[in-house]
Amino acid sequence: FSMIRRPPRSTLFPCTTLFRSKEKVLHQSLIFLSEHSTEKVSNLNYKMIRFTALLVIIAILYSCGTDTFTGADIPINAKTISIPFFENQAPLVQSSLSYKFTDALQNRFIQQTNLTSVNRGGDLNFQGYISDYQVKPISISSSDVANQNRLTIKVFVRYENKLENDKSFEQSFSRYADFDSSLNLSTVEERLIDEIITELIEDIFNKAVVNW
């Protein structure tokens, strides 16, 4: 089958410090060490230079509270995150959707941040529900027959950042995937759901902690 998907948004979000990324910091430090290593300095002085450069790197990387591997801008004092179950309140209920979505959102933050997951009351807290799940024709042929159908999933998210309240929000996120009308939904549904959830999680993660 053919599937048309919107391209994911960029997740390149540099730390607003002297250097814009970990790679640039390391590059600048290596140049610094290389220049000094050509001088006739003692082993002790060279070790001191290298140690000082390492401290500078650490200070720069952590001064802005940014996870340089994922681009996540998380408050330094944030330690916990709570993501309770997202109930399915859509008119058409897909049995496994809530479990898949909740699990994917939890895993994204656990795997890509240093936050500890708690049941409730986290420094960063998510709440929400599946608000819509629908399939409708989108491409009609000259004989009034649908060439393609579109599966759309919409999620309402309430995000609370207790340490930086200005970054809290309430917003609906929607993504879709198209499939050939000659295919039965049951044969492609699980794959489409997984694809859409991946894009939804990307959007929510970026909105909450990457600030694009």
Image (cartoon, rainbow, N blue to C red):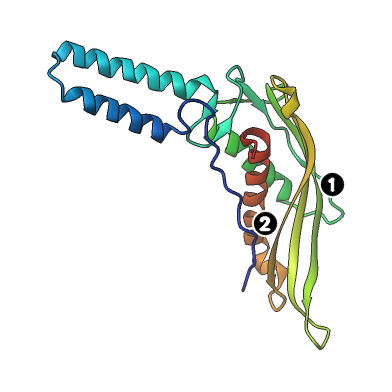
Are the two marked residues, 1 and 2, in contact with CB atoms closer than 8 angstroms? no
Tell me the residue that label 2 is attached to. 193
* Amino acid at circle 1: Gln
Would residue 34 appear left or right of 80 to someone viewing this image? left
Residue at 41% x, 20% y is 58
**Where is residue 124, by image quadrant?**
top right
Would residue 52 appear left or right of 128 to someone viewing this image? left
Residue at 67% x, 35% y is 208
Sooner in the amino-acid sequence: mark 1 or mark 2: 1
Residue at 64% x, 62% y is 5
Q: Position of residue 139 (x, y in %)?
A: 76, 76
Along the line of sight, which residue is nearer the eye, 119 or 108?
A: 108
Tell me the residue that label 1 is attached to. 89
Using a 10 Å C-alpha cutoff, classify the residue at mark 1 as few (fewer than 14 neighbours), some (14 to 19) or many (20 or more). some
Would residue 179 appear left or right of 18 to someone viewing this image? right
How far apart are the alpha carbons under marks 1 and 2?
A: 16 Å
Along the line of sight, which residue is nearer the eye, 58 or 146?
A: 58
Q: Quadrant of the C terminus?
A: top right
Along the line of sight, which residue is nearer the eye, 103 or 53?
A: 53
**Where is residue 119, by image quadrant?**
top right
Using a 10 Å C-alpha cutoff, classify the residue at mark 2 as few (fewer than 14 neighbours), some (14 to 19) or many (20 or more). many
191 up-or-down from 145: above or below: above
Q: Position of residue 86 (x, y in %)?
A: 75, 40
* Amino acid at circle 2: Ile
Disc 2 is placed on an element classified as helix
Disc 1 is placed on an element classified as loop
Residue at 55% x, 23% y is 65
Q: Single out the residue that lies furthest toward the bottom.
A: 143
Q: Position of residue 102 (x, y in %)?
A: 68, 41
